[in-house]
Amino acid sequence: MTSSFSDVVRGRRMTRSFRPDPILPAVLDDLVDLASRAPSAGKSQGWHLVALEGPETATFWDITLPPERRPSFRWQGLLEAPTILLPFADPGAYLERYSEPDKQRTGLGAGTEAWPAPYWTIDASMAVMTLLLAAEDAGLGALLFGVFDGEIELREALGVPDDLELLGAIALGYAADDPDASGTGRSARRPRRSPEAIIHRSRWSPPPATGDP
């Protein structure tokens, strides 16, 4: 691990307040190009982004956070984000890829139930994580958050196929000078688990004792 990569990982925060300054299309293209290099089973590359930029972001907010609910919304600076990205996982891309001759013997092209884990979700999530790190490296702020209200209406408004899986939304832009809105949610105050608490070396738990002590 290089020190520069370590700095990017340690410096990344979820940004909740943005300046309205637009992101250049070439900058977004570079972020997505980096994200496209995340691992992908069979190089299926089954993920997509719907990008709403500038005034287009109103479509997202009008559906998921109607004007009558906004006065009580805690993160007002989030509404200023110049770009909203909607990442989608595409299970069909994996079934199609694993029905091709070099993968057909796996049987994974038969249907989503044949997969031991939903790799379309896993791979799309890794791409999103790579995009978040790329944004940090480019000096941008980003926030990944859930779409808890209005997903059906949002899909209809944007013409998104029903078989794609929405992972959430990514607000992207230049962070506002608002220290109260960057990485300071209640969850951010929780202590970080140590490597010792995460790693189970050799097995999950010690084997049960056998025989007399």
Image (cartoon, rainbow, N blue to C red):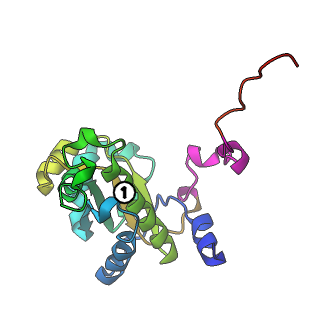
Q: Return the residue at label 1.
A: 123
Specify whether residue 41 is painted magenta. no
22 over 199 or under it: above or below: below
Q: Secondary structure at mark 1?
A: helix
Q: Nearer the viewer, residue 20 or 46?
A: 46
Q: Nearer the viewer, residue 107 or 172?
A: 107
Q: Is residue 105 visible?
A: yes
In the image, residue 22 lies at what x, y percent?
33, 76
Q: Residue at x 27, y 50 (%)?
A: 106
From the image, which quarter does the N terminus lie in? bottom right
In the image, residue 100 lies at what x, y percent?
18, 60
Q: Residue at x 72, y 32 (%)?
A: 206
In the image, residue 149 lies at what x, y percent?
28, 40
Q: Residue at x 35, y 41 (%)?
A: 116
114 over 11 or under it: above or below: above
Judged left or right of residue 207, residue 35 is: left
Magenta segment: 180-202
Type of the residue with mark 1: Asp
Name the residue furthest right: 213
In the image, residue 201 lies at what x, y percent?
69, 45
Name the residue furthest top: 212
Q: Nearer the viewer, residue 104 or 13?
A: 104
From the image, which quarter does the C terminus lie in? top right
Judged left or right of residue 119, residue 75 is: right
Judged left or right of residue 83, residue 187 is: right
Total numbered badges shown on the rendered structure: 1
